[in-house]
Amino acid sequence: MPDTIKAIAARAKALSEDPTFLDVMQRIRERQIAVFLDASSTPEAREEAHVLIRALEAITNQLKSDEDDWAFEQKKGQHRGSD
């Protein structure tokens, strides 16, 4: 049975708040930024760093999207007083 939106959102929230996960993401990001700041880095190294930074951003965006999906589902089920 596929996971529910609520279950996916709960896992996304837990992961996005996990100190170990956040630390790993930050350390990877910092290492890749250092590649850009290193004047001796090769174009290939800079391209790889760019790809990794974009991948980290995609992961962060997916976690946020998963959380937002659940928030949207909850609001969709509520009626405003003016309805």
Image (cartoon, grey):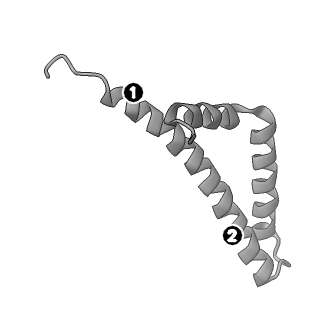
Residue at image position (45%, 39%) is 69
Percent from the top left, x then y, of residue 72? 39, 34
Where's residue 5, x and y in %? 50, 36
Residue with the mark numbered 2? 50
Q: Where is residue 45 in the image (x, y as percent from the top left)?
A: 80, 77
Q: How crowded is mark 1: few (under 14 residues within 10 Å), some or many (20 or more)?
A: few
Q: Please give the count of numbered marks on the rendered protein.
A: 2
| Observer-nearest of 10 and 22 | 10
Picture layout, residue 20 above or below residue 44: above
Tag 2: amino acid: His
The single residue placed furthest to the right in the displayed view is 40
Name the kind of residue labelled 1 in the image. Answer: Gln
Q: In this view, which residue lies farthest toward the top?
A: 81
Locate residue 71 relative to residue 33 in the image: left or right.
left
**Quadrant holding the C terminus:** top left
Dividing the picture into quarters, in which one does residue 52 lie? Answer: bottom right
Which residue is pictured at 67% across the width and 31% down the height?
A: 14
The residue shown at (60%, 56%) is 58
Looking at the image, residue 67 sits to the left or right of residue 16; the answer is left
Quadrant position of residue 39:
bottom right
Near-viewer residue (27 or 56): 56
Name the secondary structure under disc 1: helix
Residue neighbourhood size for the residue with mark 2, other residues' Cα within 10 Å, grouped as few (<14), some (14–19), many (≥20): some
Q: Quadrant of the N terminus?
A: top right
Given the current orientation, which residue lies at the most extreme left position?
A: 82
> Of helix, strand and loop, which one carries label 2?
helix
Q: Are marks 2 and 1 in contact (CB under 8 Å)?
A: no
Residue at image location 81% in from the left, 82% down from the top = 42
Judging depth in this view, the residue of 22 and 3 nearest the camera is 3
Residue topped by disc 1: 74
